Image (cartoon, rainbow, N blue to C red):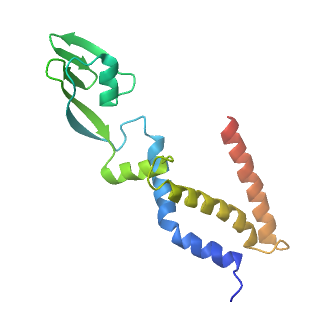
Amino acid sequence: MAKVNMRILHRYLGFFLAGIMAMYALSGIVMIYRNTDFLKQEQLVERTLKPNASYEELGKALRIRDFKPTKTESDIVYFENGTYNSKTGQASFTTKELPFVLNKMTQIHKATTKSPLYFLNIFFGVSLFFFVISSFWMFRPQTKVFKYGLYYTIGGIILTLIMLFV
């Protein structure tokens, strides 16, 4: 059986994970703008809820954080981007969503243990950590390239610390 070389493992795992690394990079960039309307498309949502729901129940049922009605006229409750008929239970509002593929990508990026494929995110995170460690086996420690690589590593660690504490 051939000896497994760290460089070979690093190379082929990198090729294997190229697609998912690109997906995480793109979704990470998109998520920076999640509190804006960047790339989002407006969608009309209509739901039938229970009649005479309280404002708290209404906010939970519609999944609207910090739900606040703007005004009430007769049986119609007005809120940002929509209305609710307290007599019939009919709610109509607009939301802004990312296009389907970008939305799926950001959902994968934000996965929790309740997500069905969360273990793939763990595998990906462990693989990225492997890349960090295995990169130090790419060149012999006596070479100039390795020594310069350590300077870049120190620079990257300093940048990371600045980002964490600023």
For residue 52, side relative to residue 5 (left or right): left
How many marks the image carries: the answer is 0
Find residue 107 and report its horizontal and vertical position in percent: 42, 48
Find residue 160 and report its horizontal and vertical position in percent: 69, 46
Residue at figure coordinates x 66%, y 41% from the top left: 163
Figure quadrant of residue 11: bottom right
Quadrant (top left/top right/bottom left/bottom right) for the N terminus:
bottom right
Direction right: furthest residue: 142
Residue at figure coordinates x 20%, y 22% from the top left: 84
Figure quadrant of residue 4: bottom right
Residue at figure coordinates x 31%, y 49% from the top left: 99
Figure quadrant of residue 88: top left
Direction bottom: furthest residue: 1
For residue 19, side relative to residue 129 (left or right): left
Find residue 120 and report its horizontal and vertical position in percent: 51, 59
Residue at figure coordinates x 18%, y 24% from the top left: 89
The relative height of residue 165 versus residue 105 in the rendered view (above or below) is: above
For residue 118, side relative to residue 88 (left or right): right
For residue 86, side relative to residue 105 (left or right): left
Find residue 41 and report its horizontal and vertical position in percent: 28, 42
The relative height of residue 16 versus residue 102 in the rendered view (above or below) is: below
Quadrant (top left/top right/bottom left/bottom right) for the C terminus:
top right
